[in-house]
Each structure stands twice: as structure tokens, then as C-alpha cells.
Amino acid sequence: MNLPKEQIEDITLALKFLLNETATQISKEFNLQGHKLSGSSIRQMEIKVTQSGNTVTGVILVAYYWSYLENGVTSARIPYSGRRGVAKVSKYIQGLISYFERRGLPEKEAKSAAFATAAVHRRQGMPTRASRRFSRAEGGARTGFIARAAERVESYAYEVFAEKMAGQLQLRIVQALSNQEEVIEIN
């Protein structure tokens, strides 16, 4: 059954609204958990809504590393052996050095802080217990920012779609009556 163009447009608008609201909530939780450094992660977030036939699909695209921030990383998966100078310079260590330099540390101190942080990550995983101090989220949360945002939006997502669909259902009943088609009552 093909849906009327107006109904597809209503669904598309409702989905765009909900995805924008979800992105806003993700941004808020991301910042509350203390993940913001330069703000580029949030600026890179992209919402895409596509429509093909009766299907409307929406996604929020984010940077690949968000999965590590959302879920954390176990200590066994930290790419650091704890031995300096054994292998070539890792991207992981380079990323930590860059992080500390963006925080204002000189190169030598940034390198020291990077290796110290890597050692703690190797023992505790990410996030570390001490990183809770950077979080203003409930319970000092440092993971689950996407899930928390989705939960907040989910509470009224059904209402938004129910409102759009209720109007369409009423329209279909009126159309059915005016066309003198058989109407089945749903209780």
C-alpha cells in the first residue's frame, strides 16, 4: 500500500525533528560527561534523512571514536605494552601527546603525561576511575551519553509520531466514509 505524499512528508518532518532533538540531547550529555575539548566532535555530527517509496530512514553520523567514548575500552584492549622504546611510536601514544599539548602542556611534559595516562589506561581501561571528576553528569558518568540522550528523546518520540499518525488515521477514516468503503472499528 502506498502512503499519500503528505503522510510521507509528515513522517519525514517528525523524524527530522526527533533526530535534531536527539542530536541536541547527545551534545548536552557529551558535554556534561566532560568529553568536550575543541567542540569539533559535536560540530562533525551530521543528520541524514532519506526517503524511498514508503520508507523514511534517519541516521545521526558521528566520528568513529565515539564508540570508544560511548562504551569505554577494557584494559586488555588498550594498545600499550608499558615498555618504552620497544616498538615504533604508536598512534595511541601520539594521540595522547596531542591531547595534552592541546591542553597547553609543553612537548616534554605532554609526552610524560601521555605515557603516564597510557599506563593507567592499561591498568584500568577507559574511562579511568579518576576521570569521573571531569563529569557533571548524573553519577559521574563517562560512558553511555548516546544511550542516555536516546532515552530522554524516546519518552516523547512516540507522542510525536502518534500525533502525526493519528491525523492520518482520521483522514483515512473520513476518506473511507466518503468513498463508502467498509470501515472496521478498532478498539
Image (cartoon, grey):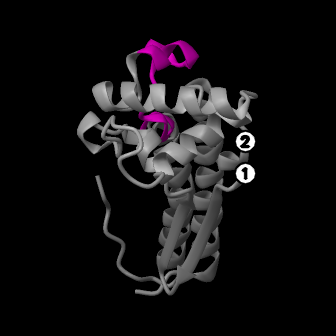
Magenta-tinted stretch: 130-150
Q: Residue at x 40, y 23 (%)?
A: 128
| 26 or 4, nearer to the observer | 26
Name of the residue lying farthest toward the front: 85
Q: How many badges with numbers are in the image?
A: 2
Q: Is residue 128 left or right of residue 107?
A: left
Q: Residue at x 38, y 24 (%)?
A: 120
Q: Is residue 152 above or below residue 98?
A: above
| 12 or 74, nearer to the observer | 74
Give x and y (percent) for residue 27: 63, 39
Q: Residue at x 36, y 40 (%)?
A: 71
161 falls in the magenta region:
no
Give x and y (percent) for residue 134: 57, 18
Q: Is residue 45 left or right of residue 135?
A: right
Give x and y (percent) for residue 59: 53, 63
Label 1 Cα neighbours within 10 Å, binned few <14 / some 14-19 / many ≥20: few
Q: Amino acid at mark 2?
A: Gly
Q: Quadrant of residue 75?
A: top left
Q: Amino acid at mark 1?
A: Arg
Would you say the magenta stretch is mainly helix, strand or loop?
Answer: helix
Label 2 Cα neighbours within 10 Å, binned few <14 / some 14-19 / many ≥20: few
Q: Which mark is residue 39?
A: 2
Q: Secondary structure at mark 2?
A: loop
Q: Which mark is residue 43?
A: 1
139 falls in the magenta region:
yes
| 89 or 126, nearer to the observer | 89
Q: Which quadrant of the rendered structure holds the N terminus? A: bottom left
| 141 or 13, nearer to the observer | 141
Answer whether residue 27 is visible to the viewer in this image: no
Q: CA distance from mark 1 to mark 2?
A: 6 Å
Q: Are marks 1 and 2 in contact (CB under 8 Å)?
A: yes
